[in-house]
Image (cartoon, coloured by chain):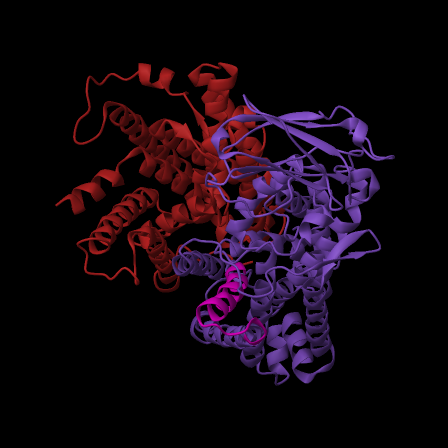
Amino acid sequence: MQIGTRAADTPPRPQTRGRGGIPSHRSVLRFLAPLLLALVILGVAPSAQAASAAEDGYRVTVNLRDTSNDNAPVEGVDITATPEGGEAVEATTDADGRAVLEIPAEFQGATVLVELDEDSLPDGAAMREGAPAEQTVTLNISTVGVTFLIGEDNRNVMTKWDRVPASIYNGLLFGLIMAMAALGLSMVFGTTGLTNFSHGELVTFGAVCTMLLNTSLGVPFLLAVPITVVAAVGVGWLQDRFLWAPLRHRGIGLIAMMIVSIGLQFFLRNFFAYITGSRTEVYDEYATGAGSDFAGLFTYTTRDIIIAGVCIVVLAAVIAGLSYTRLGRATRAVSDNPALAAATGINVDRVVSTVWMVGTALAALAGTFLAFQLGVTYQIGQLMLLLLFAACCVGGLGSVWGALVGSLIIGVLIELSALVIPPDLKNAGALLLLVIILLVRPQGLLGRRERIG
Amino acid sequence: MDLLTNALHDAFAPIAISYVLAAIGLNIHYGYTGLLNFGQAAFAAVGAYGMAVLIVSFDVPLVPALLLALVGAVLLALVMGLPTLRLRADYLAIVTIAVAEIARLIFSTSFKQYFNARDGVQGFTADFRDLNPYGEGAIGFSRNDLWVITVGWLLVALVLAFVFLLMRSPWGRVLKSIREDEDAVRSLGKNVYSYKLQALILGGVIGALGGFVGALGKGSVQPDSFNTDFTFIAFTMLILGGAARVMSPVVGAVLFWFLLTFMDVLLKRITGDGGFVPGWLLNPDQTGNVRFMIVGLVLMLLMIFRPQGIFGDKKELAIDAR
């Protein structure tokens, strides 16, 4: 899950990620991706260009940067532009490495031969090997950018090994966020035995709820998140009170409950598609942050660090709560043996209801954060559900630490596998690990043997 | 009137037949054996893609292509079943849904020279259509559709007869007793694991037959027609008809498809221009979502209030909830 570079097929490069001033709306990004790529190839400075024909003549701009010299501007290079059937225009690059050649308006649509005088290159600067010193452009927009490649090619110097730290960082971030949702799934499974196939939709709920508050009602993101979490607690209570508790009391089988959860998943997913109009949305705020470089290994944003911090605090709070509070101990007792827990005076229904509330809130919070990487779309749930299953099964279904460890493993595995297999298939790698782990160690890494029966 | 005729038309069309066969397969899994297979779409996909790719890319004649595709379905059942059938029921559910998703991802992103990514595979129907005895189309179906429908419903009848006889045999009775009480069966010296695997294979192969009919009816195979929705729709059909009854997938599927098309035509009519539902509430693009919301709701309500469906016997379906 790369952040910000998803739209481009290029390897993630720190430069493109932190580039300021580019609106990060997804559709804009999608539109910009080929353009950016074209800019990289053409080397045109990303300046706004009017697409209409100019009445007061055409401008051919040249922007010279030496890639061997930290992209420093190259000054004092003579450039000649000769429009077809016209006279040559000359210019010399200034201190910013820029040269502008004015061509009269009568040459609309004509081709122009732009030449760089290699002898005028300053000492130490040289044309890139194989790069042409003359190019032709067509005058169909008022300002045409031309570039000449100077200095050695360092665009694709990042090898797969160089991308490993960034992949691990992204994977850990994704895994941390996913761990919250996985913890909820695991807790519900532990206390009720239900494999909840609608848990992914609770993740979507978080994203969609925050998005609606943020974009439709104009609630600031920092306020929208707590509101979403409170709303999720309400949803968790509601679904236990009116759906799962009655089913439990009627003694309906677990398989039947699983099919009910499938029905709920189907309902909710299409409900979210209906609400969002099947579009992918983004929040109004914090859509991109300025990237900072960490020891040359990977790029992080303040936003992501804060998200990771929130995840760690929340996970620690829930795990501490399970370990040390009365309710937490009661929860673990119910997980172990509901009948025995009830016999010792624990109100099993209240414990399960709390678990549903906490689990839904965790899922929604995860969804709120995941939407930064996946966009707010009704498809988050379906994707996350399978990854959550993979995480829980790898770690051990029903185990709290298992959910955490499993999520981190799956998160890192997804990102690392994208280096070797096509990125489209990276989620398949996680699901494959799920199958393999069930084959060799069905209780998962941290699960207990008796659960799998 | 087209409200009813459209719906009736779709209820017997090739696509409905493919769902009928998928639901019959699920009936063997869930209805008779108590296995929760949430990856029936993968079996249909392997059937459809297997046949299409073998014919288009490898010039295999129709019949061997069909047989090889069925072998593919058997292998898929082994992949799904071997790791999970010894474990609790939910592990099978998780792995089947995961394998189905892996299969769809592979069909839509890998081996593009064979699968053509999202465009899918076309041009495999020639051999099948050459066998068509009909001169022209009738009752609103084209000549090709009519041929697919004839073959498809004949296939359904054969499979149903086979399932009927099989479930009365000792083998079928073992399956049903596995569903009721696995430990009791084990104590009688039956190899429960092996029986479950056989049931998974058989149901999967029938699901692959559904893939054939769907592909031949549409004339093309696309990865997105085999997403998880396919499985859940087939499941809803099965439960609507009533699990563990031979005829129930057919009745469930025909009824379901009738209602789905009926709702579609109805929703399209009451929305957009000339409809009375305002656009902010529901525009014609969203009718698909609303339809499937209702499907999800129906599946939930059926499972809660009438898990035996229309025909089922509640006493018989005391599925061992482990």
Measuring 60% from the left and 75% from the top, which residue is drawn there?
A339
Compared with residue B244, is residue A334 higher up or lower down, i.e. above or below? below
Q: Is residue B2 left or right of residue A314?
A: left
* Residue A355 figure quarter: bottom right
The residue positioned farthest toward the left in the image shown = B1
Q: Main secondary structure of the magenta part?
A: helix
Q: In the rendering, at what x and y percent does residue A88 appear?
A: 62, 26
The part of the chain drawn in magenta is A200-223
Compared with residue A193, is residue B213 higher up or lower down, i.e. above or below? above
Q: Is residue B292 visible?
A: yes
Measuring 64% from the left and 65% from the top, which residue is drawn there?
A180
Q: Is residue A444 visible?
A: no
Label the purple chain with its letter. Answer: A
Q: In the rendering, at what x and y percent does residue B1 appear?
A: 12, 45
Q: In the rendering, at what x and y percent does residue B184 appear?
A: 56, 53
Judge whether residue A247 is colored magenta. Answer: no
Label the red chain with its letter. Answer: B
Q: Nearer the viewer, residue B92 or A237?
A: A237
* Residue B125 figure quarter: top left
Picture mark count: 0
The residue positioned farthest toward the right in the image shown = A124
Question: Split into 4 quadrants, where in the image is the C terminus of chain A?
Answer: bottom right
Judge whether residue A212 is colored magenta. Answer: yes
Q: Nearer the viewer, residue B272 or B102?
A: B272
Q: In the rendering, at what x and y percent does residue B150 appear?
A: 27, 27
